[in-house]
Image: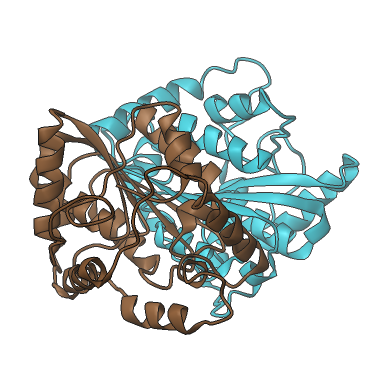
Chain colours: A brown, B cyan
Amino acid sequence: MTRGDPAVVNALAAHRPVIAFDNAGVGRSTGETPDNVAAMARDAVDFINLLGLTEVDLLGFSLGGFIAQQIAAEHGPLVRKLILAGTAPRGGEEHLLAVLQEAFSDTDAPDPRLPLFFTKSSDSRSSGLEFLKRTKMRKDDRDTDSGSAVTDPQAKAVITWCATPDPEHAILRAIRQPTLVVSGSHDTMLPADNAYVMFKALSNAQLVLYPDSGHGALFQHHELFVSQVRTFLEA
Amino acid sequence: MTRGDPAVVNALAAHRPVIAFDNAGVGRSTGETPDNVAAMARDAVDFINLLGLTEVDLLGFSLGGFIAQQIAAEHGPLVRKLILAGTAPRGGEEHLLAVLQEAFSDTDAPDPRLPLFFTKSSDSRSSGLEFLKRTKMRKDDRDTDSGSAVTDPQAKAVITWCATPDPEHAILRAIRQPTLVVSGSHDTMLPADNAYVMFKALSNAQLVLYPDSGHGALFQHHELFVSQVRTFLEA
């Protein structure tokens, strides 16, 4: 469920089958992008079922992490282990619009993903430039860029998920699978406090927080992330 | 600086030189156990200097983690990397006496380290029994048990460190070394909130929190801990 960084997807795929997919309406997938996490989760479960898979490990990044939580909570037997990266619980803290606005008004940035995913330190910034290069590696069957027919309902889904109070953490408490929660120290979009909250409410979670990193912590610390994911899945 | 678990110390020592030592007055070390962290840190630095070492990686568990923080903050060039396990920042939260009292009044426990270091779950408890077996593996040159001439000043050092307010985190902010902070989800003595606080105040820290584990999280999850320590030290 994470798109975009070959350093993560290809490295994981070297050791196990990885299905990186675009949900309905996104990238080269047909259909309409829903504006809520529950519908996105239904689409993903339909996709998994249609592939004939009866048990999967789910890795969800950002909005994908909301969807992965929903699936793991509602479809226990379908999900063996869960990895939640750069994400938030229902009712969590988000600063999506403020961060997007700042990123897209940063005319010095070569790409809005630099301020969106990385910190202002020189280490993080140079990791970000490496990441941008990697996102251009694939030449064939590239995903199309998402227009507002995708990003508008996605933004609504993110904002609604975080605006839905869940003081008892009903979703997290329904997740019984071993879960790895990963976040960056300075994620401006979905702050690391979310990860700590998820860790505490989940019954069987390991938490890993990386230094000097933003929403794209898994891209910045990709070697460590891949190694920790592999150890977690193989344990 | 951690004693006791061959699964941790021997596994680390398989790949690098490890110096496990007892500070002044403890175990088979002569001298008097000081009642404060600053003096303990001076003793440890003297020991390192007398060995002729000019740069070391420090691993401090519990009270050892207080000492390791003090050393890393005050002796920057001496410490290359820092590992803080089951510990707390100056001014942090401790429940030492309450937990000790409960552990020593638990007459069903075969050893007070079981309730001190492990949770009440069956998984954690059986890890605890394995740990207790491991602590008896060594036959020669075993440390002597600590009497009150050791534990009283140690307890005073723990309580004083945590009772000393440090709202600006002067010690943590003086630590510039890469740091790995590790804690258990249900550490009753030095709760995991301490680890999260340390992670946030340190400039270059990775945080790892383990599921269903107490103060002895590094003993319970020893394979994962050793693997993460190795990855951290070799990065």
As drawn, is A217 to the left or to the right of A234?
right
Quadrant housing the C terminus of chain A: top left
Asked which quadrant contains residue B191, the reply is bottom left
Q: Is residue A14 visible?
A: yes
Q: Is residue B216 visible?
A: no
Task: Judge by depth and name the residue closer to the eye, A146 or B175.
Answer: A146
As drawn, is B169 to the left or to the right of B103?
right
Q: Position of residue B75 (x, y in %)?
A: 79, 60
As drawn, is B174 to the left or to the right of B200?
right
Q: Name which residue lies at 59% across and 38% down.
A: B231
Q: Residue furthest front?
A: A140
Note whether A121 is above or below B87 in the view shown.
below
Q: Name which residue lies at 36% across and 25% down.
A: B129
Q: Position of residue B83 (x, y in %)?
A: 61, 48
Q: Name which residue lies at 51% across and 52% down.
A: A136
Tag count in the figure?
Answer: 0
Task: Judge by depth and name the residue closer to the eye, A101 or B157.
Answer: A101
Q: Position of residue A31 (x, y in %)?
A: 13, 55
Q: Position of residue A53 (x, y in %)?
A: 16, 29
Q: Name which residue lies at 73% across and 58% down.
A: B71
Task: Judge by depth and name the residue closer to the eye, A97 or B119.
Answer: A97
Asked which quadrant contains residue B214, the reply is top left
Task: Judge by depth and name the residue closer to the eye, A88 or B180.
Answer: A88
